[in-house]
Image (cartoon, rainbow, N blue to C red):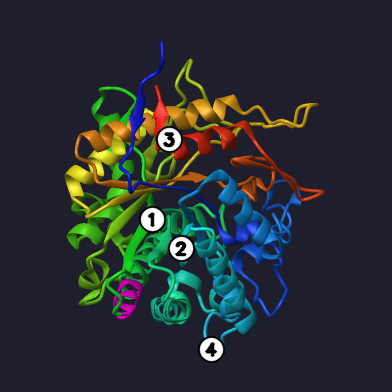
């Protein structure tokens, strides 16, 4: 008995995603400036086993091989990020032609193979020189970012039509400036909240710049990490804790972009830590965008915990499957968050800009990587995304995280998310079973159930 195939629209974009610091390497070559992640990774004790992104996947030198692999995967689109310090080493001032030339060549290579480039303009690797001026806590960065976006857009905008301003501003602000586990490693909640505002402001400024290209093909959005937040019990304090975490993670970014205002409950909760907002800021932040990118990995189950930040902690689910990141496998969550974003905010379009899972993959004696847990993970998430579309969600594409194993931030090279296995000592790329499976999904434009 043959399985049902859940078919996707003919123009649906199947892709994979990466980020500059996680794959490029060449951290100090051809005029590239230092980034906050170069500095953070070279600081003892910050990254697991002292790993750095100095070489990573050596994509800077091997991009042609990587694009060839994308072609073998039958990818329709590829989401990657620009390294700000590679193109403007000090973050402002003179551009680095060698850095711009690299992205020129990469875009041309993608287009030659019929792969649509989706560019993320900021995926966390801020020029260190700007960090020394206060980083994202300095309001001036919104202007510097707009100048950087203009430089890149004028260089690539004749060929690139899909732009993402920021990747996961929650992570930059609350993990980078609140908890300090990401670069630049600052632990100050008031600073994190102010940073979140400056990131959103810089997003709005970037939208203005990209609109000024005057190209009707230009499509602009932002990528947010979103999750359903469920209370651990029916107790009022747990429900309030879940609402608070939802406010911090989801609504604090969605509301300003789509409604032009911060959520009142969180504004009240932050109290004297609320950001300084100047006249006109919210109209800039809420400039119309063409899509929102959703990065989804798991849900959070929350209980009240007065000793922790935001007065809450998250719980593990007994008997549930967990990935190598200790994230619960919860495919229904992608349906829940897609429906919620569509119903509450009505974006013109949505892309899943990241979804995937880390598992302890190994190369078997016959040279194969049998990552069947990843195949099951993706299959279930694709099916729930399909269900959301059937119920009116305007989902236009899906980018699996990640094209290949890479530098997983504070976890170094200990976590493998890729469709392609990386043997780091030799830089050999090996297609995992999930890569072969995904190619068939793309070729059929559907997933078997």
Q: Quadrant of the C terminus?
A: top left
| Residue 294 pos. (x, y %) | 37, 48
Instruction: Nearest to the eye among marks 4 and 2: give it.
Output: 2
Q: Quadrant of the N terminus?
A: top left
Q: Which residue is at the front of the view, 392 or 328?
A: 392
- Contact (CB < 8 A) between labels 4 and 1? no
Magenta span includes 209: yes
Comes first in the chain, label 3 or label 4: 4
Q: Which residue is mark 4?
A: 93
* Crowd band around label 4 with a 10 angstrom C-alpha radius: few (<14), some (14–19), many (20+): few
Q: Residue at x 56, y 44 (%)?
A: 73
Where disc 4 sits, the SS reads: loop
| Residue 47 pos. (x, y %) | 68, 51
Where disc 1 sits, the SS reads: strand
Q: Which residue is mark 1?
A: 223
- Contact (CB < 8 A) between labels 1 and 2? yes
The stretch in magenta equals 206-213
Q: Which residue is mark 2?
A: 120
Q: Please say whether residue 240 is visible from this viewpoint.
A: no
- Using the numbered discs, state the Cα–Cα distance from disc 4 to disc 1 in whole angstroms: 27 Å
Q: Residue at x 27, y 35 (%)?
A: 388
| Residue 438 pos. (x, y %) | 51, 36
Magenta span includes 437: no
* Crowd band around label 1 with a 10 angstrom C-alpha radius: few (<14), some (14–19), many (20+): many
Where disc 2 sits, the SS reads: strand
């Amino acid at each position: 008995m043959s399985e049902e195939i859940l078919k996707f629209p003919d123009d649906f974009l199947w892709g994979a995603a990466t980020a500059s610091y996680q794959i490029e390497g060449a951290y100090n070559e051809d005029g590239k400036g230092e980034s906050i992640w170069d500095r953070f990774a070279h600081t003892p004790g910050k990254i697991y086993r002292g790993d750095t992104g100095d070489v990573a996947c050596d994509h800077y030198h091997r991009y042609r091989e990587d694009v060839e692999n994308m072609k073998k995967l039958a990818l329709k689109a590829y989401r990657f990020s620009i390294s700000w310090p590679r193109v403007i080493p000090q973050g402002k001032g003179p551009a680095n032609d060698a850095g711009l030339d690299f992205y020129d060549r990469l875009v041309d290579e993608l287009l030659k193979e019929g792969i649509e480039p989706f560019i993320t303009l900021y995926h966390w690797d801020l020029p260190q020189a700007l960090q020394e001026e206060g980083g994202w806590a300095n309001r001036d960065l919104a202007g510097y970012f707009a100048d950087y976006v203009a430089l890149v857009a004028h260089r690539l905008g004749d060929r690139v039509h899909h732009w993402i301003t920021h990747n996961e501003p929650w992570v930059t602000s609350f993990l980078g400036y609140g908890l300090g586990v990401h670069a630049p490693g600052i632990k100050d909640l008031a600073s994190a909240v102010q940073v979140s505002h400056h990131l959103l402001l810089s997003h709005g400024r970037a939208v203005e710049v990209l609109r000024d290209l005057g190209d009707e093909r230009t499509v602009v959005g932002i990528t947010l990490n979103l999750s359903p937040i469920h209370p651990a019990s029916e107790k009022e304090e747990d429900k309030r804790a879940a609402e608070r975490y939802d406010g911090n993670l989801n609504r604090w970014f969605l509301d300003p972009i789509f409604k032009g205002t911060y959520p009142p409950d969180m504004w009240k909760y932050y109290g004297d830590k609320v950001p300084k907002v100047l006249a006109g800021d919210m109209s800039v932040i809420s400039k119309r965008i063409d899509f929102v990118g959703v990065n989804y990995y798991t849900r959070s189950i929350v209980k009240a915990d007065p000793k922790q930040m935001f007065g809450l902690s998250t719980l593990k689910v007994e008997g549930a499957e967990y990935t190598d990141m200790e994230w619960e496998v919860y495919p229904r969550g992608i349906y829940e968050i897609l429906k919620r974003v569509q119903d509450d905010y009505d974006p013109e379009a949505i892309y899943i800009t990241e979804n995937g899972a880390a598992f302890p993959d190994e190369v078997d004696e016959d040279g194969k990587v049998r990552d069947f847990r990843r195949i099951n993970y993706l299959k279930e998430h694709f099916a729930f995304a399909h269900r959301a579309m059937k119920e009116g969600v305007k989902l236009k594409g899906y980018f699996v995280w990640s094209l290949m194993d890479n530098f997983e931030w504070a976890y170094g090279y200990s976590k493998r998310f890729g469709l392609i296995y990386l043997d780091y000592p030799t830089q050999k790329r090996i297609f995992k079973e999930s890569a072969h499976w995904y190619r068939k999904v793309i070729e059929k434009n559907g997933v078997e159930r």
